[in-house]
Amino acid sequence: MKRLTKEKVRVKHLGVWSVALFFAVLSALYGLVAGILGVIAVVPAFDLGIIAAIGAGIGGIILAMIVWAIGGFVGGAIAAIVYNLVFAVQGGIEVDLDVESIGGRP
């Protein structure tokens, strides 16, 4: 039988690498959307052949994803470092978790 129990935990440290990687992936997805919108807005303004327009569109989308991912990685790393400095002074963040236990084991 599955039971949910409430557990209070305190987060005192964030892994810089994992936070940076998370924000890199999230930002790459934003870059995909921004790249598509940018290509839709910019490519028709130029008198390109169909092959050149497709190439420019794909290149623009990939470039946007890379630039946004790098920015997200750097921003996520900086945020994690700042959070860790604040946690060291403040003591962390309390989080309520629902923990599932199966057969009496936590």
Image (cartoon, grey):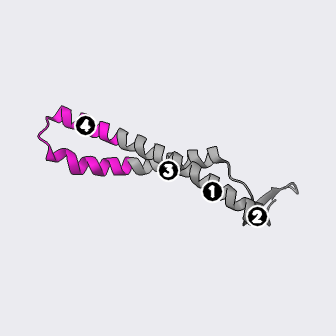
- Tell me which numbered mark, 3 or 4, is placed earlier along the sequence: 3
- Tell me which numbered mark, 2 or 1, is placed earlier along the sequence: 1
**What residue did someone put label 3 on?**
26
- Tell me which numbered mark, 3 or 2, is placed earlier along the sequence: 3
- State the CA–CA distance, disc 2 to disc 4: 50 Å
Point out which mark residue 91 bears.
2
- Secondary structure at badge 4 equals helix
Residue lying at 63% horizontally and 52% vertically, measured from the top left: 81
**What residue did someone put label 4 on?**
56
User: Is label 2 or label 4 in front?
Assistant: 2
Q: Residues within 10 Å of mark 3 (few under 14, many from 20)?
A: some
- Tell me which numbered mark, 1 or 3, is placed earlier along the sequence: 3
Q: Which of the pair 30/106 is nearer the observer?
A: 30
- Whether residue 66 sits left or right of residue 7 in the image: it is left
Q: Which of the pair 9/70 is nearer the observer?
A: 70
User: Is label 1 or label 3 in front?
Assistant: 1
Amino acid residing under circle 1: Val
- Secondary structure at badge 2 equals loop
Residue lying at 16% horizontally and 46% vertically, measured from the top left: 44
- Tell me which numbered mark, 1 or 4, is placed earlier along the sequence: 4
Amino acid residing under circle 2: Gly
**What residue did someone put label 1 on?**
82
- The segment highlighted magenta reads 32-61
- Please provide percent x and percent y for residue 63: 36, 39
- State the CA–CA distance, disc 3 to disc 2: 28 Å
Amino acid residing under circle 3: Leu
Tell me if I can see residue 92 in this picture.
Answer: no
